């Protein structure tokens, strides 16, 4: 499957970036696991069972999906690249968002947000939430955050022969997912013209 050619066709046909994203990220196979589809099923099925969500709501993104990162302009490399997972599920988004809301007493207590480089992640968390994206690495500390990290840490360990780590984010809907991933098409166009 030639992902680059498919993106080029979409651009040449003046398709909306969201449609190009829908085609490549929601319907094409995962490049890093072509020939190893059983592994892809095992990973997605574990995520589906752990969060009690439909398996079809889980998508692979990033360089593992297409063979290269359009943001970092590097190719997927076994054991070096991450497996980035997008969970597109309104109920799960709501569950985790409500947890963050309760954990921070309606965002009045922002002390539980992680501090990175001397700054609270609160503003970044709110920025992503407003775009329909829940970033677990930005969520307040507590049991759900610890359980998330434990689950994905264990899953990463089980597949360290192929991926450096396995990470995930939650999208409120397909629209928010497509909007976020559309930046990849913009990056591809920018890097192509450089």
Image (tube, rainbow, N blue to C red):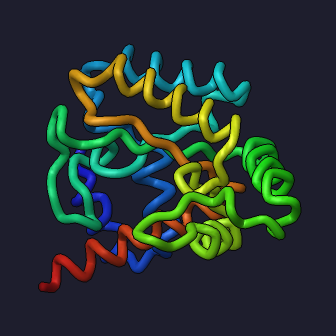
Looking at the image, which residue is at 62% across and 30% down?
147
Looking at the image, which residue is at 64% across and 56% down?
134
Q: Is residue 57 left or right of residue 30?
A: right
- In percent of width and height, residue 84 lies at 41, 44
Looking at the image, which residue is at 34% across and 35% down?
165
Quadrant where the N terminus is found in the figure: top left
Q: Is residue 79 left or right of residue 89?
A: left
Quadrant where the C terminus is found in the figure: bottom left
Looking at the image, which residue is at 68% across and 63% down?
111
Q: Is residue 184 left or right of residue 21?
A: left
9 vs 168: above or below = below
Q: How many marks?
A: 0
- In percent of width and height, residue 103 lies at 80, 51
- In percent of width and height, residue 172 lies at 71, 55
Q: Nearer the viewer, residue 144 or 48?
A: 144
33 vs 13: above or below = above
Q: Is residue 77 left or right of residue 105?
A: left
- Among the 4 quarters of the image, the one containing residue 33: top left
- In percent of width and height, residue 2 lies at 22, 49
Q: Nearer the viewer, residue 157 or 84?
A: 157
């Amino acid at each position: 499957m030639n992902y680059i050619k498919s993106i080029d066709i979409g651009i040449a046909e003046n398709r909306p970036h969201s449609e190009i994203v829908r085609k490549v990220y929601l319907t094409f196979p995962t490049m890093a696991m072509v020939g190893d589809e059983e592994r892809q099923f095992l990973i997605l099925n574990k995520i589906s069972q752990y969060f009690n969500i439909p398996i079809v709501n889980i998508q692979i993104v990033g360089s593992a999906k297409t063979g290269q990162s359009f943001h970092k302009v590097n190719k997927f490399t076994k054991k070096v690249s991450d497996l980035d997972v997008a969970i597109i599920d309104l109920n799960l988004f709501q569950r985790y968002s409500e947890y963050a809301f309760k954990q921070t007493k309606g965002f009045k207590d922002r002390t539980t947000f992680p501090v990175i480089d001397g700054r609270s992640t609160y503003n970044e968390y709110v920025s992503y939430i407003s775009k329909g994206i829940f970033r677990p690495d930005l969520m307040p500390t507590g049991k759900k955050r610890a359980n998330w990290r434990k689950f994905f840490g264990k899953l990463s360990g089980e597949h360290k022969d192929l991926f450096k780590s396995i990470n995930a984010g939650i999208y409120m809907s397909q629209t928010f997912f497509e909007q976020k991933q559309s930046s990849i098409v913009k990056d591809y166009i920018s890097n192509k013209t450089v």
